[in-house]
Image (cartoon, coloured by chain):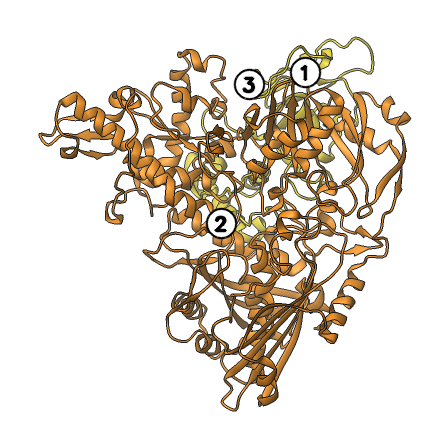
Amino acid sequence: MIRAGACAAAEIAENRMSQSENAAPAPAKRAPAQPPAPLALSINDKPYYHEGDPQMPLLWFLRDTLRLTGTKYGCGVGACGACTVLVDGKATRSCMLPMQAAAGHSVTTIEGLETDALHPVQQAWIEEDVAQCGYCQAGQILAAVDLLKRRPKPGEDDISAITNLCRCGTYPRIRKAILRAAALAQGQGK
Amino acid sequence: MSRRDAAPVDAGRRRFLSVSLAAGGALLVGVRLARAQEIEPELLGEDLTAVGPFVRIERDNRVVIGARGCEIGQGVMTSLPMLIAEELDVDWSQVLVVQLPYGYADTDKGPSNRYGDQGAGGSTSIPNGWKDLRQAGATARWLLLQAAAAEWKIAADSLRTEAGEVIAPDGRTLSYGALARSAASLSLPDKPVPLKSPAQYRIIGQPIRTADARAIVTGRSQYGIDAWAANALVAVIARCPHLDGTLDSFDDTETRKVAGVRDVVAIPGPKPDAPFDGVLAAGVAVLATNTWSALKGREALKIGWKPGPWTKESTTALAARAHELLDNDEDGLEVRADGDFAKARKQARLVVEARYEMPFLAHATMEPPGALIEINQDRARLVASLQDPDGASELISRMTGLPRKAIEIRMTRAGGGFGRRLRNDFVAEAVVIAKEAGKPVKLMWTREDDLQHDFYRPFGVHAMAATLDRKKQVTGWSHRVAATPLGYRNDAAAKRPAWSGTIGADDFPAGLVANLDKRFFALESGLPRGPWRAPVHTFQAFAIQCFIDEIAVATKQDALALRLDLLGEPRQIPYEGHGGPVFDTGRMANVLKIAAEKIGWGARRSDGHGLGLACHFTFGGYAAHAFEVSVEGNDLIIHRVVCVADIGRVINPLGAQAQMMGGTIDAISTALNLAVTVKEGQVQQKNFPDYPLLRMAHAPRNVEVTLVESDADPSGAGEIGVPGAAPALANAVHAATTVRVRKLPLMPELLKRL
């Protein structure tokens, strides 16, 4: 990784770390010097605070502030779904969700999906060898997690309702992986 | 499921183990346990147990193999290490794959690369790796054998290997791990070592899952856009929206008030009429501590543009000009002429003619272009999603004055390529900004930037004519194309004939029809052009393969039989283009016949469904597509899609099937709805809502892929799945509806005429 000398801005030193130094996503500053009051939210079961622009989309807080880069930028207008995260369990396009609106909610990113073991959807994705370039797959996986929570035994039409874009054309394997994940989850009683 | 099938999952899990064990060594200190894929890849060449540039064997017998290619989704992170692992003779479950950096080296003979060819273009990764990476694996195995021979004091040629062990005639074994240190100290063999015979293959030809799948599904995979450097600033650029326009004036007062904005830098555009050897457009860059601030700062800029020389350019005018050129038939550039087409035309019983219009296309890689660059007094480092690291290295050297050996390039997984990253304009922009700012810069492109400032797939109109005799035999074939040449403001492409990229001299039916005339007419346009996945082939196959169908319909012949008649007896005919030196008519006919059989060609149907066929030869591989479609109301329903490919020996069937499936869906997505259009010298499309890639609901639920078994040397798989799909689809649409769509994208045309 690129590593440069001393940091120019304190906020970079505190909120931004290079990938190789970044042992764990660090919370942003907890004690704000002045208003506006920091926005509190939970990300992957840990508390975080944001005290910058309340209009900043969650996507950039995840990627630029926390360096949780598994959530991808694709279009910035909610059209492609590469930035999909779970907000209170519901698949949500983080590029369109201002921090103000994310505050008080519980966010799960692709990095937080694996707990003790891979989530059945992640496992199924590996087994069906879904990914090509892989860039959209975090969003696809989280959309599938949301779908399976609502419809544990999804039909083809339920899967068709996922609108995340894939430029590589992995859709048929995504379909198979979702059905496999449904079977895996059933087997695990999830 | 076979054990081998499960291997990649294991490999992912092993990665954690490997790093935590290795972290005791000084070289790995500081690497996070949970970020295993961030192992400094250059360790691969420096460790005491490195056996050649691609292989490192740990004492516990785990084998680290370096992946040299640009992984853009074509699977080289898996398939290239497979070639090495096969000849090294290890079990795939022992293997840990790591991405290699760009391997520039100065040598007595000039610039060199210690890893060989690292670029991604023209489906060459596998054919090139087939030549040198198997030898790399075999050489590492040879060194291990020599080490074992020395240890046991017996002749090396009495030893054999299996799954990471050397085995003596008396049954004693030594693991590669135990031999690695002594093997690493031996001299390389002075001539190439023998390779396995195909009967000995244990990895090549097996379905192997993506080596780094676990990193992908857990969000830990690193793409160019994910790179960061302490002290870096994020840059976004407001680029001139007018083709070849320039910056007149700008006011950044409001921009500088945006929290987080640190600097504003003007970017001079490319010199008028000169090649695009660096940046693509004039602009103003905003640098900030984070992307959101940079974007807000960019929005607050007040910029006056000078619109440049192309304000009258429009796609409509371009199409009219193309037809005018083709109507007048003047100033055409001869691409290939066999026999006497004019005479054939005079003597013909019947002449069939049709024109096909192909739109400009954007690449729209899911990960937009971007680059992280740090330039110091005597060094530069680039981290980016690339297809041409050589080009990036040359460019940075030229722009900074630094020698190439002082430029370090870290290659990452790339969120798609499709030819977009064969140009390094985004690297040049990052260099310009970093030099101005005096800081590391992470350049971000938005989707709008990407769709409006691409190197677009050319626009053009194909005019086809075929002459037939009384027996309905094709006696002559004319293919004239009026198109925007690839060589526009591109020195490298300008060295090739103007027509390259839009028509292939030796492509179908060259060599199969006695009287052939291929001509090119240049269209002037200010839109930058570049290669787009299977460049000339996606551009021409639609016209060629739809036109054969039209000839069949006009002469009441079977479209399969007509193609097979034209191909004739199985034989090899000369093919000088990329993918040559020969085109095998038998291999083409074979995939076509299999595809026809799979789709149920020839059976009478009463369900209103239509079938369509097409085939194409691309970069050494042969593919045929077959579609079954119906139109219900305003919906085009794709019931079945068949893709049959002969790409020679298949290295990784799971990966090759994925490429055929993905290539086919990419082609469908593009053919149905995608076009870039220009009006008043500006690109009209801005984001995915007006460049609508196919979504799950409209994609076929399955692509039935068949890979023909073959002993021929492997060709690449990344592009051949594309060219035949669009014409097969359009031919099926005609069969179902009698509507012949001759202009892409297909859906708007079809809806107009239903």
Per the model, the C-alpha gap separating discs 2 and 1 is 42 Å
Instruction: Give the drawing colour for chain B.
Output: orange
Question: Could you say which is closer to the camera, residue B167 or residue B465?
Answer: B465
In x, y percent, where is residue B628?
52, 68
Residue located at (66% from left, 38% from top): B369
Per the model, the C-alpha gap separating discs 3 and 1 is 14 Å
Q: Which mark is residue A15?
A: 1
**Chain under disc 2:** B
Residue located at (88% from left, 28% from top): B252
Q: Residues within 10 Å of mark 3 (few under 14, many from 20)?
A: some
Label 2: element kind:
loop
Residue located at (38% from left, 55% from top): B648
**Chain under disc 1:** A
In x, y percent, where is residue B82?
37, 39
The answer to which image quadrant residue B485 occupies is bottom right
On screen, residue B213 above or below A153: above
Residue located at (42% from left, 39% from top): B78
Which residue is the site of mark 3?
A: A20
Q: Is residue B556 left or right of residue B54?
A: right
Q: Is residue A190 visible in the rendered structure shown here?
A: no
In x, y percent, where is residue B572?
39, 67
Which residue is the site of mark 2?
A: B123
